[in-house]
Image (spheres, rainbow, N blue to C red):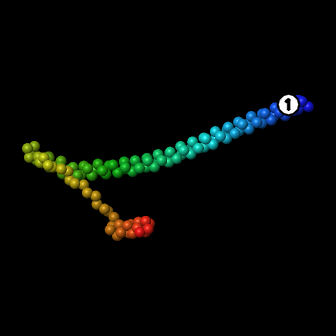
Amino acid sequence: MTRQNTAIYQKIAEKRANLELLREFRSLTDELANELEQIGDQLETMKDGTSSVALILSNWQRVIQSISLASLSLLKSTNTATNEEVDQDAYPEPLIRINLQDENEDEQESESNDELNGR
């Protein structure tokens, strides 16, 4: 009978050790899942940032073309005039922004914004 009790106690000790390993494994698995969620959130943030950078870079060519166009008249005036006649106050053409939306669209947008804001 003593052998059976010893064998039972030995099995109980093994089961407790297995239970402790299972708890540790579960804890590590939960930590890994949390870390992966944080990495996923950080990747989402990086994706949003790279989209913004891509939008800026896609417009950069237009910005350079606009600056070149504005400076074109300054270049022409310096090429046509002699070195002594160059105007010291010569500036590039001013750049302006023109709203391409129709005025009715602007009014509709402001009315819908007022409705959304509760005004």
Q: Which residue is found at the position 40% from the left and 47% from the top?
A: 53
The x, y position of residue 24, in whole percent, is 67, 37
Lateral position of residue 23 relative to residue 91, left or right: right
- Front in this rendered view, residue 94 or 80: 94
Lateral position of residue 47 relative to residue 30, left or right: left
The x, y position of residue 5, in whole percent, is 87, 32
The x, y position of residue 78, in whole percent, is 14, 47
Quadrant in the picture for the N terminus: top right
- Front in this rendered view, residue 45 or 20: 20
- Front in this rendered view, residue 8 or 53: 8
Outermost residue on the right side: it is 1
Tell me which corner region of the image, top left, top right, bottom left or bottom right, holds residue 36: top right
Q: Residues within 10 Å of mark 1 (few under 14, many from 20)?
A: few
Q: Which residue is found at the position 78% from the left and 33% from the top?
A: 13
Lateral position of residue 38 relative to residue 15, left or right: left
Residue 10 can be seen in this image: yes
The x, y position of residue 66, in whole percent, is 27, 52
Q: Secondary structure at mark 1?
A: helix
Residue pointed to by mark 1? 6
Q: Which residue is found at the position 81% from the left and 34% from the top?
A: 11
Q: Which residue is found at the position 72% from the left and 36% from the top?
A: 20
